């Protein structure tokens, strides 16, 4: 069994709080992604668990044992840092074999395990190369193979796929998840890539300014974001500012600038209260003809982008607000040109409502 527990953990650097009273439980065999923007404290949190640095306050336990003062090599973890930390004087196979040999395996067994990991990371053909002869992406794959070959049941990954090309990154996402499941590894995977996190994680922990903003399954985080920041950072959304103009049983009307009115299925806010409406881009419907339905907004196509499976349209509404609409790329889907008139529909059941942030919407949308 491999579990991790953080209780009221805090870490400061030169008076700046990097990790701010974090409480977190990670269960045996769970694959957890720590997701957040650059500077949110992700790497610091991972280094605290690995034992590379010590907390200023709080307790870190692995398998129920307090490890605040236990050195990294005695924690039973495999830590794969973002900077690779390979031995420059050792060949690839020797780097990967280091962990198995240190655990007492004979050279034949260590080499067999190491070759399996190098096959998985598609580097078996560079076994005799030195790290300095490899690209950054290759070095990252060697570091990943070395961590996997160590035999540790707690795997700590700091942006493990960040330096890889897009195709290989997608391929290794799935293989890494399979390997963790097959070997019952407890894995903590740090990333700033929302798509990566939603694909591999059992649970996502969203970090911002050293604090946990939300945690839960990828589906829960995506569909039930608790804040404007999470809604924007995980998946992206459109945000519209307004105030509650009318309140009814189970619903309300929100007035945007330009006297645009939006009907929402939420009556938890008071009349006159400023709010922010959020709706996912793929749920923002677009058409050439405005039907006589609720929440139809007229606008003009400002920009278009081809995203493979989707077309993205940026629509400038008549009131000056901008809405992005993602439309599946199909043969029958309507095509729009820049400058063309379009109608956007925001369905009431797809709209989430947030109190207007004290520092303003754009400040709340900032990564830091």
Image: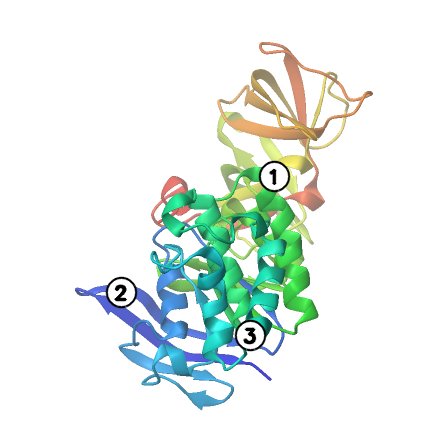
Seen from the viewer's position, the closer of residues 300 and 35 is 35
Seen from the viewer's position, the closer of residues 283 and 263 is 283
**Which quadrant would the N terminus be assigned to in this image?**
bottom right
Q: CA distance from mark 1 to mark 3?
A: 27 Å
Instruction: Name the colour scheme.
Output: rainbow
Seen from the viewer's position, the closer of residues 262 and 307 is 307
In the picture, measured across the screen, residue 231 lies left or right of residue 7, that is right
In the displayed structure, 31 sits above or below 313; it is below
In front: mark 2 or mark 1?
Answer: 1
- Secondary structure, mark 1, is helix
In the displayed structure, 67 sits above or below 323; it is below
Q: Which mark is residue 17?
A: 2
- Secondary structure, mark 2, is strand
Q: Which mark is residue 37?
A: none
Q: Which residue is mark 3?
A: 151
Task: Classify 10 Å Cα crowding around label 2: few (below 14), some (14-19), many (20 and above).
Answer: some
Q: Which residue is mark 1?
A: 167
Q: CA distance from mark 2 to mark 3?
A: 34 Å
For the question of whether residue 273 can be seen, the reply is: no
Seen from the viewer's position, the closer of residues 119 and 220 is 119
Q: CA distance from mark 2 to mark 1?
A: 37 Å
Q: Which is nearer the N-term, disc 2 or disc 1? A: 2
- Secondary structure, mark 3, is loop
């Amino acid at each position: 069994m491999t579990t991790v527990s953080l209780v009221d953990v805090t870490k400061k650097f030169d008076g700046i709080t990097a990790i701010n009273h974090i409480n977190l439980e990670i269960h045996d065999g769970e694959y957890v992604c720590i997701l957040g923007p650059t500077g949110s404290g992700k790497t610091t949190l991972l280094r605290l668990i690995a034992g590379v640095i010590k907390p200023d306050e709080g307790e870190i336990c692995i398998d129920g044992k307090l490890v605040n003062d236990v050195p990294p090599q005695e924690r039973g973890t495999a830590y794969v840092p973002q900077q690779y930390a390979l031995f420059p004087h050792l060949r690839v196979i020797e780097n990967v074999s280091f962990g198995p040999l240190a655990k007492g395996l004979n050279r034949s067994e260590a080499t067999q395990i190491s070759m399996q990991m190098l096959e998985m990371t598609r580097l078996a053909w560079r076994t005799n190369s030195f790290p300095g002869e490899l690209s950054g992406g290759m070095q990252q794959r060697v570091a990943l193979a070395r961590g996997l070959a160590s035999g540790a049941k707690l795997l700590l990954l700091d942006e493990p796929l960040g330096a890889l090309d897009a195709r290989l990154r997608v391929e290794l996402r799935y293989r890494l998840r399979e390997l963790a499941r097959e070997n019952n590894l407890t894995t903590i995977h740090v990333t700033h890539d929302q798509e990566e996190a939603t694909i591999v994680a059992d649970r996502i922990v969203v970090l911002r300014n050293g604090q946990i903003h939300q945690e839960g399954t990828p589906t829960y985080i995506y569909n039930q974001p608790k804040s404007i920041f999470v809604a924007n950072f995980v998946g992206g959304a459109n945000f519209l500012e307004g105030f509650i103009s009318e309140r009814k049983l189970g619903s309300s009307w929100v007035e945007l600038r330009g006297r645009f009115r939006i009907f929402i299925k939420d009556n938890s806010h008071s009349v006159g209260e400023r709010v922010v409406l959020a709706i996912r881009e793929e749920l923002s419907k677009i058409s050439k003809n405005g039907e006589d339905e609720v929440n139809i907004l007229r606008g003009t196509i400002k920009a278009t982008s081809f995203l493979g499976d989707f077309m993205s349209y940026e629509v400038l509404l008549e009131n000056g607000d901008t809405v992005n609409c993602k439309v599946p790329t199909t043969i029958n889907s309507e095509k729009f040109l820049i400058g063309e008139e379009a109608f956007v529909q925001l369905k009431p059941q797809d709209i989430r409502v947030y109190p207007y942030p004290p520092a303003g919407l754009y400040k709340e949308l900032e990564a830091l």
